[in-house]
Image (spheres, rainbow, N blue to C red):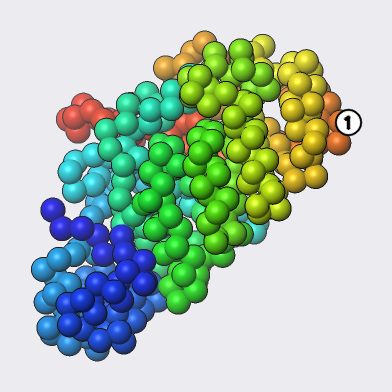
Amino acid sequence: MKKSIYGLTRDQLIEWLMGQGQKKFRAEQVWDWLYIKRVQNFAEMTNVNKECLQILEENFVIQTLKESVKQESADGTIKFLFEMQDGNLIETVLMRFKYGLSVCVTTQVGCNIGCSFCASGLLKKSRDLDAGEIVEQIMKVQFHLDQIQKEERVSHIVVMGIGEPFDNYKNLMNFLRTVNDQKGLAIGARHITVSTSGLAKKIMDFAEEDLQVNLAVSLHAPNDELRSRIMVINKAFPIEKVMAAVDYYLEKKNRRITFEYILLKDVNDHVEEALQLAKLLENKRHLSYVNLIPYNPVDEHGQYQRSDEKSISAFFQTLKNKGINCGVRMEQGSDIDAACGQLRSKQIKKDKVKVNN
């Protein structure tokens, strides 16, 4: 199968085309057609010569994702189910906020992290997405916005869909550089957030990158015993290792980190855990923000329930009283299984899928 041309950063596109005997300005023209004019086939690139177009046609495709299902929530959230060239399915979510339009992208087919409360791990990882497949999720959402004739653009990105982004590090970084490129989509680095379950070495690698992209760490428990119980990854990267990597990141970047914390009723939502979390973040509270996430139901994980409002409020207030910056995430898209922890790629035969459009 031909690779997606979206998988090349601008520098890589220039280098590749020049290697094919083309001039640098040709690559700049192609880039402009892809990301500013947003064409969906090479033939539309009317000022690019035939030789260059033929080279592109022989080696790349623009579209590798096919929209299979599109569901819209009552709150305006839209979930897209895309089929890839190899038949695998992935999900991408468009969310509307007062500050702009944010897209949650997927980086892997399935997930091996093993969070016991999350739907995304119900299907074990079968492969990484390449950079082009990740970029194309943004482009598909932008095509949708272009078609409804509203002058709207994707302004924010959260890399929090199916998969562990740092387990697909090289493709993740090419994706980030492509969507951040000021001659293309120009989505500001500070408008992009990458979430990790705590791959300590990759957090340190990320600290060395020259992008000012936001980092979020999925913590979900303040001690190893509890975290290992609900997140298998903690056995490989216990809290001490994660926090050492976080300290390294803060030293290098001096930028705030968000800690994600899903509240599970009678599991990790007691004042005791809030006090432990505050203690854990005590020496870095000036650069920490805790995002408290009410649990969103997943049929296959019936052992968990959403914390009640009293417990959420008590947890929040305990953190505040200890000087920890925190907030409760606004829920979006739960009615179409598009909220945090609900995304999954339902890899079953199409003749068994019943979708109410």
**Residue drawn at 13 percent across, 53 percent down:** 1
168 to the left or right of 154: left
Amino acid, disc 1: Asn
**Where residue 86 sits in the image (x, y, percent)?**
17, 43
Residue 148 position by quadrant: bottom left
Residue 177 position by quadrant: bottom left
**Residue drawn at 64 percent across, 35 percent down:** 244
**Residue drawn at 66 percent across, 18 percent down:** 223
193 over 264 or under it: above or below: below
Q: How many marks?
A: 1
**On the image, numbered disc 1 is attached to which residue?**
321
Q: Which residue is at the front of the view, 247 or 12? A: 247
**Where residue 6 sits in the image (x, y, percent)?**
31, 63
Residue 106 visible in the picture: no
308 over 180 or under it: above or below: above
106 to the left or right of 219: left
**Where residue 63 sits in the image (x, y, percent)?**
24, 60
Q: Which residue is at the front of the view, 178 or 152? A: 178
**Residue drawn at 29 percent across, 74 percent down:** 15
Residue 246 visible in the picture: yes
334 to the left or right of 114: right
**Where residue 34 sits in the image (x, y, percent)?**
32, 72
